[in-house]
Image: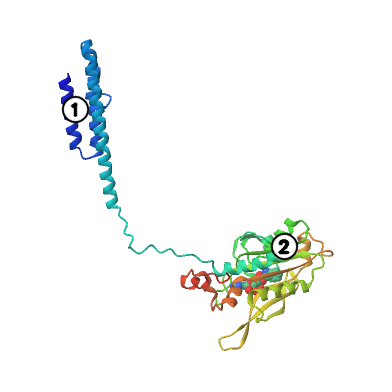
């Protein structure tokens, strides 16, 4: 039996020496030291030996088992190391290659204008409000004092989804929504957002553009309060050298109403004007529908065209540049406000 055991040991050690993969090494372990491995089975043969031979044989089997375990362990370490070397060689990184370039994004010029205007008005105690772009006719027109057959609806030719639902034509419906939410309490809000109209696209008009609505309702609000807010905004956005002019205008939701133009220098050096916003004192009907008593409360409101502000601020010649996602255009606005 001892000879057979020693033969097994020599065979096993030879096989371990020859093996070249971890998988085959595991097969050898199973063959000799697994549950039904040949060396393990020798242990069960102890019973067949005479009593006096058992201790010596038992000791010998253990020695062989330990020796094989050690040999398997050493070989495993060796093979794992070789495999690691192979992986390292195949995955070698050439640190001299040029790196992958990551482009840093910039804030879109329209969002820069919105953030700038928000900062100014938040500093004056205004809250920022939001409303849906898909709006009910009720909020977009009727609560803005434009009944179903009102001719001024033609001023904002609209994209209807169904008879009562449209893409909002201005941010003014947020006025109505906020008034109802504030339940008759004083309020000061601005609301930036996208609006949609069936306008023809040209250098200063787009069928989708951006507005910032402003609304203040309180006691003792008058036209001077509106003019003060507009002047502060114009000076903040354009500096002292730009001039603004207020032209009498008409909006069904304000009375009196104005349109505000900002001066700019034309290519030939002469002064031109570009309309940037509509504004006025909130019409008593709008106050009443919003839950305010016009005898006690007054308000002013304005709606700014964000693209027009950006056009003036950055001397851009065509509104369509804002929507084309051309990196050559957008990269010029890295941190303009920062
Ligand atoms: C309105 O939209 C009113 N809701 C503004 C308002 C609010 C008045 C509150 C009174 C009180 P208007 O249609 O004029 O008004 O548009 C406001 C601004 O949006 C314009 O001054 C202009 O700067 C911009 N705008 C209008 N149409 C376009 C367009 N097609 N493309 C780009 N900007 C536009």
Q: Position of residue 6 (x, y in %)?
A: 17, 24
In the picture, measured across the screen, residue 222 lies left or right of residue 97, that is right
Instruction: Work out whether 87 lies above or below 103.
Output: above
Which residue lies most toward the top here?
Answer: 51
Does residue 301 appear to the left or right of 265 in the view shown? right
Badge 1 element: helix
Q: Which mark is residue 143?
A: 2
Judge from the rendering whether residue 168 lies leftward or rightward of residue 90; answer left or right: right
Residue in the foreground of this view, choosing between 143 and 329: 329
Q: Nearer the viewer, residue 34 or 123?
A: 34
Looking at the image, residue 280 lies above or below residue 44: below
CA neighbours of label 1 inside 10 A, class few (<14), some (14 to 19), many (20+)? many
Q: Which residue is mark 1?
A: 9
Residue 322 sits above or below residue 75 on the image = below
Please state the horizontal and vertical placement of residue 45, each as a whole percent of the image. Answer: 22, 16
Q: Residue at x 28, y 42 (%)?
A: 80
Q: Quadrant of the N terminus?
A: top left
Direction right: furthest residue: 295
Decide which of 121, 34 is in the foreground and name it. 34
**What residue is shown at x 56% (from left), y 86% (from top)?**
267
């Amino acid at each position: 039996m001892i000879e057979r055991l020693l033969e097994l040991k020599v065979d096993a050690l030879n096989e371990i020496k020859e093996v070249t993969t971890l998988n085959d090494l595991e097969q050898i372990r199973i063959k000799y030291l697994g549950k039904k491995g040949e060396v393990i089975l020798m242990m069960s043969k102890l019973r067949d030996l005479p009593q006096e031979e058992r201790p010596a044989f038992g000791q010998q089997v253990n020695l062989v088992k330990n020796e094989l375990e050690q040999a398997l362990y050493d070989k495993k370490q060796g093979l794992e190391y070789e495999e690691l070397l192979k992986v390292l060689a195949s995955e070698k990184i050439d640190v001299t290659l040029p790196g992958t370039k990551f482009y840093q994004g910039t804030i879109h010029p329209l969002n820069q204008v919105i953030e700038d205007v928000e900062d100014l008005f938040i500093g004056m105690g205004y809250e920022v409000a939001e409303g849906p772009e898909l709006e009910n006719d009720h909020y977009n027109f009727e609560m803005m004092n434009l009944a179903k057959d009102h001719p001024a609806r033609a001023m904002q030719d609209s994209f209807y989804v169904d008879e009562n639902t449209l893409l909002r034509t201005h941010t003014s419906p947020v006025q109505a929504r906020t008034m109802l939410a504030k339940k008759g309490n004083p309020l000061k809000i601005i609301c930036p957002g996208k609006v949609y109209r069936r306008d023809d696209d040209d250098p200063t008009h787009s069928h989708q553009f951006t507005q910032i609505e402003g609304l203040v309702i309180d006691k003792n609000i008058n036209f001077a309060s509106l003019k003060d807010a507009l002047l502060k905004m114009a000076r903040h956005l354009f500096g002292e050298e730009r001039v603004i002019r207020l032209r009498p205008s008409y909006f069904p939701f304000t009375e009196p109403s104005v349109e505000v133009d900002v001066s700019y220098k034309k290519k030939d050096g002469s002064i031109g004007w570009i309309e940037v916003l509509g504004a006025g004192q909130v019409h008593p009907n709008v106050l009443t529908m919003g839950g305010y008593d016009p005898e006690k409360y007054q308000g002013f409101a304005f709606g700014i065209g964000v693209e027009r502000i950006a056009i003036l601020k950055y001397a851009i010649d065509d509104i369509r540049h804002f929507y084309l996602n051309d990196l050559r255009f957008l990269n010029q606005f890295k941190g303009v406000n920062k």
